[in-house]
Structures are given as C-alpha cells and as structure tokens.
Image: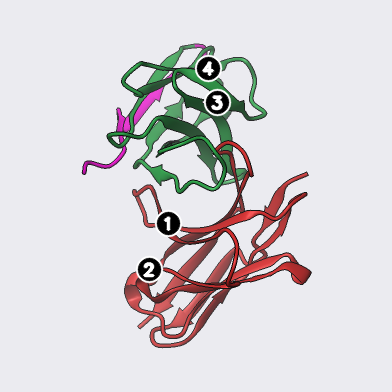
Chain colours: A green, B red
Amino acid sequence: KAGVTQTPRYLIKTRGQQVTLSCSPISGHRSVSWYQQTPGQGLQFLFEYFSETQRNKGNFPGRFSGRQFSNSRSEMNVSTLELGDSALYLCASSLRTSGGNEQFFGPGTRLTVL
Amino acid sequence: AQSVTQPDIHITVSEGASLELRCNYSYGATPYLFWYVQSPGQGLQLLLKYFSGDTLVQGIKGFEAEFKRSQSSFNLRKPSVHWSDAAEYFCAVGARTGNQFYFGTGTSLTVIP
C-alpha cells in the first residue's frame, strides 16, 4: 500500500504571497490532519479533516485554511505569508476520526518564506 | 491544558548501551500515548502506542515504553542501542476524540560507535 504523499516537497515563497500544499492519504483513510513543525515550537496541530469536513482546529490564525475532497485528498492554504511561516508542514492520515487512531505521516513539505 | 514535556533535548549514548528517553504529559483524562521517530528528511514513524491495559508496551525495532499513571510519564527504553537508532524521538498524547495529537518538543539521539 502506498504511503502518505505530499507535494511539493520543497517550496520557496516571498512574504505576502500565498501557498497551497497537497496531501494524498493512504488508500482507504478518510481522516487527514496537518501539523506545522518548527525548531522553536516543535510539532503543532493545525487542523483535521474527515469526510470533507473540518473536525478539529488548532490555534492558528485564519490565514491557515484547508479543505478535503471527496477522494480524501487534502489541501492546505496559507495566505499572506510571513517569515514565521517557514516550517516543515506534515500531513498525517488515519482510518477514522475517533480518538486513539494511529496516524501515518507523510515526508512533509518544506516551506521557506523569504 | 494538554501538554507533553520531553526534558532531554539531546542525548548521546554509545552503541550497545541502554537508552531511556523521558516523557511527561498533562491531560485531563486517561490519555492515548504514542512514541514516534523521525529520521532526517523523513516523516514520523510510529514506534509504539498505549491505549489501555498492560502498562508495559512493546514496539518496533526493540523499543518498549512504560506508562506510569502516578508519575504522568511514558518513558521509552531500549536495552541495546544500534547506530541506526540515531534520530529525533517524539512523545505524543492523542485526544480521546478526533485525531489531534499534542507533541513534545522532541529528543535528538546521537549514537557513538
């Protein structure tokens, strides 16, 4: 079974631009979660989507948004980029949205904001 | 509030030596607990998880962890470290509903030949 894939793997943007990251979950998985990983803050939960609906949201500004499609693929969008948005963005998929499910992580998208 | 603390930012051990990585959590109910490992340029791989029952759980690659409710801890152990174990290790608490994980800041492991 193919793992979680994320595209692109690397992105360089400038302040004020917007960016869209994509995540394809493991086949059959309907839950997709997004995390931001930075050296200072570690891994922080952004949001979770299940059956095209946002189920949980972390403490991030509205510039961070996402969506999920009927095939469970998910996209994350960051508008008006700031230098502090430079990070590794990880996507994780899971079978269900009930608690305690193992999450399978993708390799991440490295975003650099100049 | 939920939180996870990994007190050791960086640990260095000799190959063949034993290893213990510490994890303390704060959560309002019995948590779901996980240990993940991240190698450079890779995503996170699950080592082991605790939901309920036996407080000593076995994982992949020879790792084990013990849940101690009285100490709010979930320490990761390995009796004999291999050079390939060098990586970043993350402890996480999973919410009882939904898939939101709260991660510690990680412990970087260096293995000396």
- Is residue A92 or residue A14 the one in the foreground? A92
Q: Indicate which label's residue lies in the foreground, 3 or 4.
A: 4
Tell me the residue that label 3 is attached to: A83
Extreme-bottom residue of the structure: B16
Q: CA distance from mark 3 to mark 4?
A: 18 Å
Q: Indicate which label's residue lies in the foreground, 4 or 1.
A: 1
Tell me the residue that label 1 is attached to: B46
Judge the density around disc 2: few (<14), some (14-19), many (≥20) Cα neighbours within 10 Å.
few
Tell me the residue that label 2 is attached to: B60
Q: Indicate which label's residue lies in the foreground, 1 or 3.
A: 1
Q: Are marks 1 and 2 in contact (CB under 8 Å)?
A: yes
| Secondary-structure class at tag 1 | strand
Chain letter behind tag 4: A
Q: CA distance from mark 1 to mark 2?
A: 8 Å
Q: Earlier in the sequence, mark 3 or mark 4?
A: 4
On the same chain: label 4 and label 1?
no
Q: CA distance from mark 3 to mark 2?
A: 38 Å
Chain letter behind tag 2: B
Q: CA distance from mark 1 to mark 3?
A: 31 Å
Q: Position of residue A106 (x, y in %)?
A: 35, 41
Q: Are marks 4 and 1 in contact (CB under 8 Å)?
A: no
* Numbered circle sitting on residue A65: 4
Q: Amino acid at mark 4?
A: Ser
Q: Quadrant of residue A103?
A: top left
